[in-house]
Image (cartoon, rainbow, N blue to C red):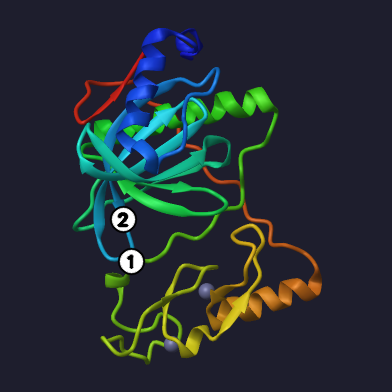
Amino acid sequence: MVDHLANTEINSQRIATVENCFGASGQPLAVPGRVLLGEGILTKECRKKPKPRIFFLFNDILVYGSIVINKRKYNSQHIIPLEDVTLETLPDTLQMKNRWMIKTSKKSFVVSAASLTERKEWISHLEECIRHLLTKTGRQPSTEHAAPWIPDKATDICMRCTQTKFSTLTRRHHCRKCGFVVCGDCSKQKFLMPRLSPKPLRVCSLCYRQLMAEEKQEGGDQRQPEQIHSAKPRNSQKSSSFVN
Ligand SMILES: [Zn+2]
Ligand SMILES: [Zn+2]
C-alpha cells in the first residue's frame, strides 16, 4: 500500500490543498495515517441528469463534491467510509460508458469514467483500499446496500402501477427501498428503515407490503454478498491520477 506516505510532508500538502478547495463548505480531512491516493473527475448519474463531480480517494474514505472551478473551488462535499463500500461494474448505456456502481448502506449511486482504463484504475485502487481496511479491522465486506435511485428521465410512467403518466402536475417520487420512480398514489406510505435514516421514508406500495411482512416475521432479508471484481494492473493516466 502507500502507508509510507502517511504523515509525510507531501501527503499533508496534498490533503491541505483539497481542504482549501472545499473551504468552509467541507470537513477537515487531515487525520493521522490518512493518505490521499488519487483524484479525478467522474460523471455521477444524478436524479435529473448525469453531472461531473470531483472525487478524491483516500486510504480510508472517498470524498466527492461539486466543481465550482476545477482545481480551485469545490462544494457540496460528501464523505464515504470505504469500509462500507462495495462496487459493481455496469454495462454501457447509450449515453454513459465505463460505468460502475458505488454501493453503501446509506446511499448507492452510479458513476462513469472517461475511459475504460480509468474505470479499471479507479476500481482497482478502491478495491485495494477496501481490502486493506477490512483486513485491518477484521470486518466482513458489507452485504446490505441502499438501492440506487432510478433517474427521473428513465421513465414517463409510474414504475409500480404503470398507469400514471408524469407531467408538471403529476410529480415523480422515489421509493427509498427499491429506488423506483413512482406516483403519489403508489407511494402513500412511509416506513422506518434505521439503516437509511432515523425518520420514516417514502416507500412504494410493493416495498411497503414486503417490509410489513418482513417485520411480522422479524427476520431481515439476507442478500448474497456483493461481487468483488478482480483488480487489474494500472495503466497510463488521463483525467484521474493516483500516487504510488
Ligand atoms: Zn403509480
Ligand atoms: Zn419500492
Q: Along the polypeptide, which appears first: circle 2 or circle 1? A: 2
Corner quadrant of residue 118: top left
Q: Quadrant of the C terminus?
A: top left
Left or right of residue 202, residue 113 in this image: left
Q: Secondary structure at mark 1?
A: loop
* Amino acid type indicated by mark 1: Pro
Corner quadrant of residue 237: top left
| Residue 63: x %, y % from top left | 41, 38
| Residue named by callout 2 | 45
| Residue named by callout 1 | 151
Name the residue: 34% across, 37% down: 22
| Residue 232: x %, y % from top left | 37, 25
* Placement of 63 over or under 235, stated as above or below: below
Q: Quadrant of ligand 1?
A: bottom left
Q: Nearest the camera: 80 or 11?
A: 11
* Amino acid type indicated by mark 2: Glu
| Residue 231: x %, y % from top left | 42, 27
Q: Nearest the camera: 67 or 236?
A: 67
* Placement of 34 over or under 100, stated as above or below: above
Corner quadrant of residue 159: bottom left
Q: Is residue 6 visible?
A: yes
Considering every residue shown, the one lying at the far front of the view is 24
Q: Nearest the camera: 77 or 140?
A: 77
| Residue 20: x %, y % from top left | 33, 30
Name the residue: 41% across, 16% down: 12
* Placement of 117 over or under 68, stated as above or below: above
Q: Residues within 10 Å of mark 1 (few under 14, many from 20)?
A: some
Name the residue: 49% across, 13% down: 6
